[in-house]
Amino acid sequence: MDKDRIGGMADQAKGAIKKGIGKLTGDAKLQAEGEADTMKGKARNAVGGAKDAVRDAVNKN
């Protein structure tokens, strides 16, 4: 598993926590930060997945 995938999952978790706290407290800025972290995490996870796929394809040959 690529380090980008691990970092992406961590960013997604951090974003979900921020969004949840933002909703509970009514803090729109914190909710927006949480959403941004979640999207960043999804993108980073996708990059890591692509790296894993390339690595697997190279190792099969």
Image (cartoon, helix red, strand yellow):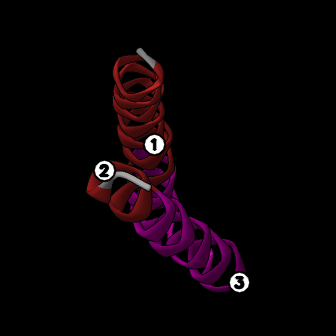
Say few, some or many: other residues with alpha carbon within 10 Å of mark 2 (under 14 / 14 to 19 / 20 or more).
many
Element under label 1?
helix
Q: Residue at x 41, y 32 (%)?
A: 43
The correct choice, above or below, for 5 with respect to 34 in the image is above
Circle nearer the N terminus (1, 2): 2
Circle 2 residue:
4
The amino acid type of the residue labelled 2 equals Asp
Q: Which residues are magenta?
A: 9-36
Q: Would residue 22 appear left or right of 1 to someone viewing this image?
A: right
The residue pinned by badge 3 equals 24
Quarter of the image that includes the C terminus: top left
Q: Is residue 38 left or right of residue 48?
A: right
Q: Is-magenta flag for residue 47?
A: no
Q: Earlier in the sequence, mark 3 or mark 1?
A: 3
Point out residue 42 in the picture as x, y percentages from the top left corner: 50, 40
Question: Disc 2 to disc 3, how far (Cα)?
Answer: 30 Å
